[in-house]
Amino acid sequence: MPAQPLATTPSPFPKWQAGALVLLYVLLGHVGIQYAAFPGTFFAQVWLPSGVGLVMFSFFGQRALPLVLLASLLVNAPYALMDAPRYGLLATAALVVVNPLLDSLQGYIAWRWWRPELESRLSRVGLQRLLVGALLSIGVTVGGLAAMQIAVGIITVDGLLVRFVMMVLSDMQGVFIVVPLALALRQQRDEIYSYSLFFSALAIPVPLILARYEASLAALVFPLVAFIIINLRFVGAATAVSIAGGSTALMVILGQDPLNFGEGVEAFSRWSLIVLALGTPMLLMGVVLDDNEGYRNDLEARVAERTQALQQALAESHVLATTDSLTGLYNRRHMEQLIHEEVKRTLRYKQPTVLIVLDIDHFKEVNDHYGHPIGDTVLRTLSDIIRQNLRQSDASSRWGGEEFLILLPQIDLAAAARVAEKLRIAVASADFGLRAPLHISLGIADLRSNESAGEWIKRADQALYKAKNRGRNQIALASE
């Protein structure tokens, strides 16, 4: 029986967010028509809804189609109906029906070309797709709208080019002002609410206001914007473009054009070109700085990961270089180094230090009767007993075969003898899995003044043989 596909639950639709965007679309549309419409029309010269519509598609995907259609209808229909006596029934019907369809198509084409779902934040390639998609969709839909207006007699062929360019500029300015700011709000909300951005952005209109009295002062906006972008990257660029574009549009509406480009259509068109021409490199600069920050963070993470791996490898190599692989105790070479260092330290501070040489009695018989794997188990178990019965400051090693060396710093001979006896009893009473108890012999030697490490080890070894010769399973002091 073929496997049944798993049922998937669609993500809940954010109704409040959709409602807020529809309301914003309608509000900005009415504001644009009321204060920035082409003379004798209800087509705005700064059309911010074009940006809001694209934001809806970037947030909701295809589900934004009815939202944009509804919002555009709520904006365009009332004005088209009010102008019905002037346009006639056919033109009015075309405006009511075609405008919302083209507005929806515009956002859909730009969204499909942009594909914001492919990346978590806007990249250089993403910005390129956004600009191309916006220009393509606006060109197609504005061209369709202009053709419809010619068909129903709203404009003449002679006015087609001017109307087409003006409407493209108004829609592109809406995309530039709204979309980057919406992306910044959605992706980096904490940064856009920062005090440094807030107060820096509030200062952007100041040079534009001062330019009313001295045109050259408008240039002060560039270092201010550069400061914002360098410090806040894409968030700063998006905010700067939105505030600069919105400020200039508002000043033209109020009759306070900063550079006195003229009035109405002429001023709006020139400022639209400036916003597009300067906004593009500003946004690109912000994206590049964001990318560089991402590359730097990624590089730092990789370096930290490699450093941790290197440190771990060094630690492992140190363990391999200093540890006996079978027992986990120090190996002979590292123990020799510790003994030489202890001799120097003891001679300097005049503190007692003792060596114990430990050997398993009749260990060859263990290997012969039980095999080498059992012999290895015996060595590991004995090493565990040694570790459990020593201080943290003590050191133990596998000296060779079944022989072990124990270094006891800052302890006298009598105390060391008690440690050795404790080890002997612990081994004799431990269960090694053998038929008979296991026994050890131990030789003990304290360090004498002006004695070398080699001489010290030799005396401890001689004490071990003394214990062996006495019958094994006992301790012997080098001083005896």
Image: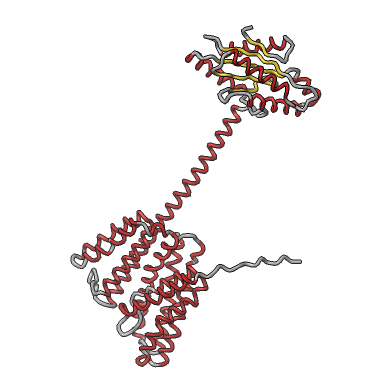
Q: Position of residue 49 (x, y in %)?
A: 40, 74
Q: Nearer the viewer, residue 462 or 112?
A: 462
Residue 253 occupies which quadrant of the picture?
bottom left
Q: Residue at x 50, y 76 (%)?
A: 65
Residue 236 visible from this viewpoint:
yes
- Image color mode: secondary structure
Q: Nearer the viewer, residue 162 or 78?
A: 78
Residue 136 visible from this viewpoint:
no
Figure check: 22 above or below 463: below
Q: Residue at x 32, y 71 (%)?
A: 272
Which quadrant would the N terminus be assigned to in this image?
bottom right
Q: Residue at x 67, y 20 (%)?
A: 423
Count of number-bearing discs: 0
Q: Position of residue 6 (x, y in %)?
A: 66, 65
Which quadrant would the C terminus be assigned to in this image?
top right
Q: Position of residue 97 (x, y in %)?
A: 45, 85
Q: Is 247 situated left or right of 437 in this image?
A: left
Q: Residue furthest left?
A: 213
Q: Residue at x 61, y 30 (%)?
A: 320
Q: Nearer the viewer, residue 189 or 399?
A: 189
Q: Position of residue 68 (x, y in %)?
A: 46, 76
Q: Residue furthest top?
A: 480
Residue 431 occupies which quadrant of the picture?
top right
